[in-house]
């Protein structure tokens, strides 16, 4: 895990090389760490290692946009779209709204829905 301000200071050659290597390591690791990088840039990625969330800095460089959760136990990326999250396991797909499961589709084709179901048209 590495973070860097991505600015190379005017310094000796050896120190500049070390600074460049540290900056490249931060880029390669998506500026991962338990807290946000102290220096941020528009469209910068940050992997929040405390919460396993991949985030992107907005264009105004004023806030982080959460793109999704990296499920370290299953080695899967689970996108977050607004208040919805797609939770994937080896045998099912679960749609959550604000952290609460709403739909579950298993690999055998069984669908579980939490709440009322309204059907329009035909399938």
Image: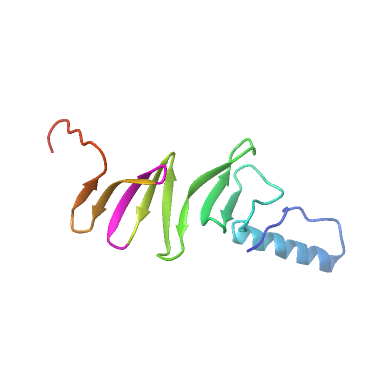
Tell me which corner region of the image, top left, top right, bottom left or bottom right, holds residue 77: bottom left
Q: Is residue 90 above or below residue 61?
A: below
**Residue nearest the observer in this picture, 69 or 112:** 112
- The range drawn in magenta is 90-99
Name the residue at the bottom extreme. Answer: 14
Q: x and y percent of residue 103 in the render?
A: 28, 46
Name the magenta segment's main secondary structure: strand
**Residue 96 within the magenta-colored segment of the rendering:** yes
Q: Quadrant of the N terminus?
A: bottom right
**Residue nearest the observer in this picture, 72 or 97:** 97
Residue 93 lies left or right of residue 52; in this view the side is left
Name the residue at the top extreme. Answer: 120
Q: Is residue 101 above or below residue 20?
A: above
Q: Quadrant of the C terminus?
A: top left
**Residue nearest the observer in this picture, 15 or 46:** 46
All told, the count of numbered labels is 0
Q: Residue sitting at 32 percent across and 51 percent down?
A: 94
Q: Residue sitting at 63 percent across and 42 percent down?
A: 42
Q: Is residue 83 above or below residue 111?
A: above
Q: Residue sitting at 67 percent across and 52 percent down?
A: 37
Q: x and y percent of residue 44 in the render?
A: 61, 48
Q: How is the image coloured?
A: rainbow
Residue 90 lies left or right of residue 22; in this view the side is left
Q: x and y percent of residue 62 in the render?
A: 64, 37
């Amino acid at each position: 895990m590495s973070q860097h301000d991505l600015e190379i200071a005017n310094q000796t050659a050896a120190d500049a090389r070390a600074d460049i290597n540290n900056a490249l390591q931060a880029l390669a690791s998506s500026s991962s760490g338990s807290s946000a990088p102290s220096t941020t840039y528009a469209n910068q990625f940050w992997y929040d290692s405390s919460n396993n969330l991949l985030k992107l800095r907005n264009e105004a460089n004023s806030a982080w946009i959460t793109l999704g959760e990296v499920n370290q136990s299953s080695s899967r990326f689970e996108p977050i779209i607004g208040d919805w999250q797609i939770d994937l396991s080896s045998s099912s797909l679960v749609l959550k709204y604000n952290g609460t499961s709403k739909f579950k589709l298993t690999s055998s084709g069984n669908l579980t829905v939490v709440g009322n179901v309204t059907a329009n048209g035909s399938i």
